Amino acid sequence: LALTISASCGSAQSNEAATQATLIIGQANEYAQQDFYQQYLGWVTEDRVPNFKFEAFDENWKGGEHPDEVYKHWGLYNADRTPK
């Protein structure tokens, strides 16, 4: 019997605009995202935890009208496919 855990986690790069931003504790920027993923990848690698990246790219269509809406900025790459 194998234990299976399914969860969503990540780090946004924008905490501007929208009510969702009020739920973010700490910094929401590319440096914080990089730190999160380095620690995350260290953990899943060391403990051999199966995982996948849900949002590779920012999705400008998500969330509200403001371009800095938090839901738009969870990808590892910008919406135009350039690296962050």
Image (spheres, grey):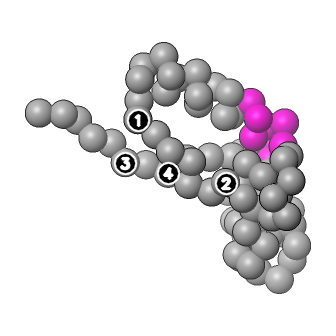
Residue at the disc numbered 2: 56
Q: Indicate the amino acid at tag 2.
A: Ala
Q: Indicate the amino acid at tag 4.
A: Ser
Q: Indicate the amino acid at tag 3.
A: Ser
In the drawing, does residue 29 fall left or right of residue 11? Answer: right
- State which region is magenta: 26-35
**Image quarter for residue 16?**
bottom right
Q: Residue at x 56, y 54 (%)?
A: 54
Which of discs 3 and 2 lies nearer the camera? The answer is 2
> Does residue 22 show up?
no
> Does residue 11 show up?
yes
**How would you rate the neighbour count of disc 1 (Cα within 10 Å): few for under 14, some for 14-19, many for 20 or more?**
few
Q: Where is the N terminus found, in terms of image quarters?
A: top left
Residue at the disc numbered 3: 6
Q: Which mark is residue 8?
A: 4
Residue 44 vertical position relative to residue 84 in the rendered view, above or below: above
- Label 1 SS: loop
| Image position, residue 13 (x, y; %) | 80, 51
- Residues under labels 4 and 2: Cα distance? 14 Å
| Image position, residue 3 (x, y; %) | 23, 35
Mark nearer the N terminus (2 vs 1): 1
Q: Indicate the amino acid at tag 1.
A: Pro
| Image position, residue 50 (x, y; %) | 41, 35
